[in-house]
Image (cartoon, rainbow, N blue to C red):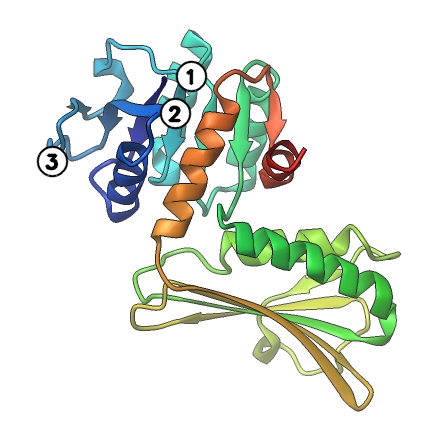
Amino acid sequence: MVKVAIVGCNGKMGGYVADAVDSRDNCETLFGVDAFGTNKRDFPVYKSFDEAKEKPDVIIDFSNPAALDGMLGFALEHGVPCVICTTGYSQEQIEQINKASENIAIFFSGNMSLGINLLIELSKQAARVLGSSFDIEIVEKHHNLKVDAPSGTALMIADGISQTLEEEPQYVYDRHAYRKRRSKNEIGIHSVRGGTIVGEHEVIFAGHDEVVTVSHQAQSKEVFAVGSVNAAAFLADKKAGMYSMTDLLADKFA
């Protein structure tokens, strides 16, 4: 039985994660951590990790970048693996996560959806085939409450494509800020915020007289919660290091 601690357990995503844990026979929620501290579930909820007395097998984090220090401090002290699904981290925080992975197992992904990770692999393959003769643009759409832009998933897609290109591309986020022709060495990344859009990502490969598009639409946040619990079950017995959806999929289909 994998005992899970959920960071941000009283948020929408935290609730979906708790439901996903409850739906599995091999997992249970040991406790939650939430700044508001309200107990909406049948497990204890602490305002911070300083209050926690139990040791979980793995931590699932769907919260806020501000919670990173407390979570990593607890995880490093007690040797607890972490599934980090929060987005919007600064470069310094990402370096902090990478440093922590030298001592504990960390599963770090901007998107826990199987479909999105398939989109990334398809986009990488398209970039290999189409090469520099096609311009690459990424459009991401999310609900009007999402704070960070571009989305962590859009950056995951761009980073995946960049690995396949001969020359490291420049990411361009805001074309109205300057007036000049688009260079070949660019990946345009565009953000849309509105309504209750869960998450849509489109990768456009625009060539001469033809366009190839790869897209994914998430219709419920539950898909991300289920993915995070799958990652937790996968990570619970892993040695220190950085893990991603690629590792989970390789394990799943081995």
- For the residues labelled 3 and 2, the Cα–Cα distance comes to 19 Å
- Report which residue position mark 3 lands on: 40
Disc 3 marks a residue whose amino acid type is Lys
The residue depicted at 35 percent of the width and 23 percent of the height is 70
Q: Position of residue 33 (x, y in %)?
A: 25, 27
- Report which residue position mark 2 lands on: 59
Q: Nearer the viewer, mark 3 or mark 1?
A: 3
The residue depicted at 31 percent of the width and 39 percent of the height is 20
Closer to the chain start, of discs 3 and 2, is: 3
Given contact means CB atoms under 8 Å apart, are the residues at marks 3 and 1 in contact? no
* Residue furthest out toward the bottom: 209
- Report which residue position mark 1 lands on: 75
Q: In this image, 26 relative to 82: left or right?
A: left
Disc 2 marks a residue whose amino acid type is Ile
Disc 1 marks a residue whose amino acid type is Ala
Is residue 114 in view from this perspective?
yes
Q: Is residue 197 above or below residue 58?
A: below
Closer to the chain start, of discs 1 and 2, is: 2
Q: In this image, 196 relative to 57: left or right?
A: left
